Image: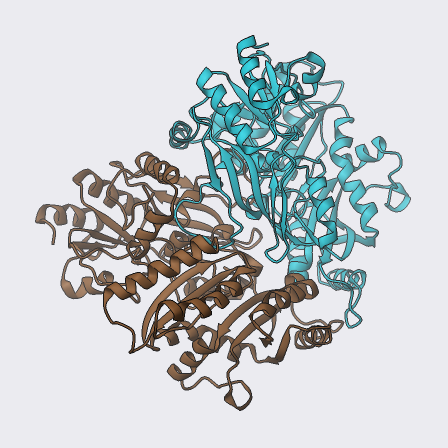
Chain colours: A cyan, B brown
Amino acid sequence: MIGGRHKGALVEILGDKGVVEDSAGMAGYESGARYDQGRAALVLRPQTTAEVSACVGYCVREGIPFVPQSGNTGLVSGSTPDAGGAQIVLSLDRMTRLFELDADNRSLHVDAGMRLSDINGRLARSGLFFPIDLGADPCIGGMLATNTGGSRFLRYGDVRKNTLGLKVVLADEAGTIVDLMSGLRKNNTGVDWKQLFVGTSGAFGIVTECALNLERLPRQVSTAYLVPRAGAAVMPLLRMMEERLGSYLSAFEGMSRNAIGAALDHVPSLRNPFQNGAVPDYVILAEISRSWAPRADEQPLDGVLETVLADIWEEDGAPLADAFVGPAHEMWALRHALSEGVTHAGRLVAFDLSFRRADVMAFRDWMRVELPRQFSGVDIFDFGHIGDGGVHFNLVAGKTSPADAVFEQRLRDWVYSAAVDRFGGSFSAEHGIGRKNQAYYDRYTQQKNKDLAAGLKRLTSPGNLGSVSFG
Amino acid sequence: MIGGRHKGALVEILGDKGVVEDSAGMAGYESGARYDQGRAALVLRPQTTAEVSACVGYCVREGIPFVPQSGNTGLVSGSTPDAGGAQIVLSLDRMTRLFELDADNRSLHVDAGMRLSDINGRLARSGLFFPIDLGADPCIGGMLATNTGGSRFLRYGDVRKNTLGLKVVLADEAGTIVDLMSGLRKNNTGVDWKQLFVGTSGAFGIVTECALNLERLPRQVSTAYLVPRAGAAVMPLLRMMEERLGSYLSAFEGMSRNAIGAALDHVPSLRNPFQNGAVPDYVILAEISRSWAPRADEQPLDGVLETVLADIWEEDGAPLADAFVGPAHEMWALRHALSEGVTHAGRLVAFDLSFRRADVMAFRDWMRVELPRQFSGVDIFDFGHIGDGGVHFNLVAGKTSPADAVFEQRLRDWVYSAAVDRFGGSFSAEHGIGRKNQAYYDRYTQQKNKDLAAGLKRLTSPGNLGSVSFG
């Protein structure tokens, strides 16, 4: 709870609807999508950049700590208050008014509280979309804070690559608004400040509006499940697909037998697409797509994919054990059910890692040997984005493994060390940094970078902002 | 010239070959590709990041100002010493040793002194390339410093989007080396510091090594010249091409009659491809390409382009006045000759602008009316990248216009004001900031951004580094 004086001042800025203080109203803002449960002093719900600025200035001048939150679908405790009950949540969930489409420029100016599904729903008629494909449905503010990549990174890149401009409120006494808005694609006139606010969990400022690059919606899609002959065959398979399909290739996703099994168990309506229901050890979902309507002079896309797979099949030492083209909707439904499925498989210890592309399967193969030696009763339920090196490396601790926090901590430390120290990978590929992985930021970040980050924080947002510290 | 004590110390670091002090040897480092002539106190030529660090640390401790230089092909006086003769040039032209290709990862680790043509020449056998297409042949260090985009931005993006990691030497007393090297595509573990060193002219540190994203080389290319019915038809034409060709479309370049004429005059071996040699008012060079070898089941690419152009031609109110598919090599040869051609057309006053895409032709049309009203005897020789909004807006002052510097200054001020204030464009699309456009940075940059930049400079590189000041 927070003093009546503060509440009164904030109601004056935002009106009654903009300030939530009852427990029931605040509950949804206090817990994360999957993890953690905190306590908020108050929830603020501004509707405009100017309101955000006024709230932020007030909090900084009064020394009140606050955490920005948009869709609150993150998995690293980056958008929720801690358990102390002193932090205000600054929610962007009413920042949903701006929606200015420039179809010629393929760009969109929106408020940061817009949901991804709303953005793409409203864009559908224009034939354009914001090309980040995720299982979850976050708001654009959080997508910027974590710089998500998702399943079609291979074709379209991450949020950073599709951001043309931002409006940001700094956590200083004035609640300074920095206008980095631009619909320009080429603009090299000094420091590209917007880059600092992408992927940094709101620690250096609160993004309130953005200009996004849009792409043309796929009009033709074809998907296949590919079964590699072994883990070591996955990389040659990807290279052969890239050689033959170039920019047609829009996804190359890996799914382990365990993850597929968990999804099939959890969502009974999913069809098991494999012969006799026997799920292979590892399966690739490959997608090719075109953004134009089918033309009479072109082979339909399923035929293209079948031709290319047949060609690969005939190569000496072909990396394929099996492959079949199938309905894109069904194939993606299984892929998108993996994340939810593994949460029901047992006690989940999840990792969002990335590697150089050739190391994705090398890491997996190494883990399959070493993990059982170090930790008994822990199974690997991995899936990921082989095309860009990202891996959702999920472990499920079985009933025979110790249920205590020390065991889990030891497991986390060991896996991160293997990923970062042994394989040169990243301990947070696309989930960003929050309280949940702050300790690993502290451990794996060079001191010079921490010093620079602390300096940058002083420069931009000296107030008590956000859930993490990069300094 | 610089004191014997300093020279001795620097020779100790770099050896005799690493230090140039004779006028003849320094001459090439003292003048820019097109503009300006400065004077260097000394030229240093380190071969490794460690040597750069040692030089930089020495210069900072001794208070010696210095300017980093790589290919020295820039057009804004960003890599040359000023006329004072006190600045040392730190050339990267011997930093050409590292060349580590990771073909699975489609990435390359190189020294910053490598030329673009050398990089792509050495890569050719692998079927990969660094996908920035330019008329000039810069080194990668300067490409990072300006964040060049070039002619195929539409497909591949700019240097920033294709940079996976950097190694940077900060201008502090230690010559601190910051290792931001990574071959990872997804990595969100704090501030993405490398973004600060891209597009900032070396003002915050000297990039010595980098990890680049590579793409698959085009294996099939088809090009056409399109003649729009009017300036206002260019944008509808681009949209129709994007709707029908999606990611096939790899360039959509605009060329004015004046620029084409200047190129044809300057390079007599170029063939005039237009009927009866009558160059249209404005011509689009459109390119489509595929990165895979031709397949029997696919229509050849020239046929695809012809089919699509015929389809556009048949639309009601088609934006085309003429269109013909032709040899890619010839069509690009004319396009790439424009830049050199316009320098021979008269007294050139060049602008590197960008706009939202729909404004490229709107700006041109506006200028064609307003420019003659304000400045007599000045002709427009523009060409540019309509697909990404970039325009090389070249003006040529004829014999009837005053030859004095005041006239030129007034012209510059007026054009930049129209571009930035009236059309919301950028005054430096892909040439970055140097002494030549420092005044416009000062004029068009918000004070808050300058303050942040000054703070960032103190944090990263307090030494007297570079040719520009962002603070």
Q: How many discs appear?
A: 0
**Residue at (60%, 75%) from the top-left corner?**
B229
Give the vertical position of A440 relative to B91 (above or below): above
Name the image quarter holding the C terminus of chain A: top left
Residue A104 position in % (x across, y down): 61, 58
Q: Nearer the viewer, residue B389 or A196?
A: B389
Q: Nearer the viewer, residue B24 or B304?
A: B304
Q: Nearer the viewer, residue A11 or A125?
A: A11
B412 displayed left or right of A226: left
Give the vertical position of A376 relative to B129 (above or below): above
Residue B299 position in % (x across, y down): 72, 74
Name the image quarter holding the N terminus of chain A: top right
A131 displayed left or right of B131: right
**Residue at (22%, 40%) from the top-left corner?**
B60
- The reply to whether residue A464 is visible in this rendering is no
Q: Quadrant of residue B349?
A: bottom left
Residue A189 position in % (x across, y down): 40, 50
- The reply to whether residue A388 is visible in this rendering is yes
Furthest-left residue in this view: B4
A280 displayed left or right of B327: right
Furthest-front residue in this view: B373
Residue A114 position in % (x across, y down): 66, 37
Furthest-right residue in this view: A276
Q: Nearer the viewer, residue B169 or A469?
A: A469
Give the vertical position of B388 relative to A191 (above or below): below
